[in-house]
Amino acid sequence: MDYGMIGKIEKAKRYAQERDRIHFQSFVVEINGKNNAHKVEFADGVWKCDCDFFASRGVCSHTMAMEELLKDMVPAPAGVV
C-alpha cells in the first residue's frame, strides 16, 4: 500500500474543502449556451466573453455564471462589494 499517496489524497480533499486557499490567476472556459458556445476568460482580475452582450455591457450571463460558480475564489468585479 502506498501510504504517501494516501496522505496526498487526504490533503487534496482538505484543500478542495478549504476553498479560501485557492485563488485563480487566469483561466479560459467554454460555456455552451442555448444557441452557441461562448469563450469566457479571466486574467489579472478581469473577465472577458466573446458574446455580443458582453461587448456592449462589459458583463453577461456567462461571466456572471462563472462568478457565481467560483464565488469567493476570484476577486469581485470593480464596484461590487
Image: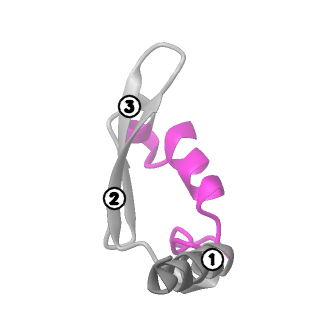
Q: Is residue 53 above or below residue 72?
A: above
Q: Quadrant of residue 40?
A: top left
Q: Is residue 73 above or below residue 20?
A: above
Q: Nearer the viewer, residue 6 or 47?
A: 6
Residue type, mark 3 in image: His
Query: Would residue 23 be visible to someone looking at this image?
Result: yes
Name the mark nearer the viewer: 1 or 2. Answer: 1
Q: Residues within 10 Å of mark 1 (few under 14, many from 20)?
A: few
Which residue is tagged 2?
27
- Measure the C-alpha gap from mark 1 to mark 2: 17 Å
- Residue 80 bears which disc, if any? none
Tag 3–tag 2 contact (CB < 8 Å): no
- Of the numbered discs 3 and 1, the one sitting upstream in the chain is 1
Residue type, mark 1 in image: Arg
Residue type, mark 2 in image: Phe
State the scheme by which the image is colored: one colour
Which residue is tagged 1?
19
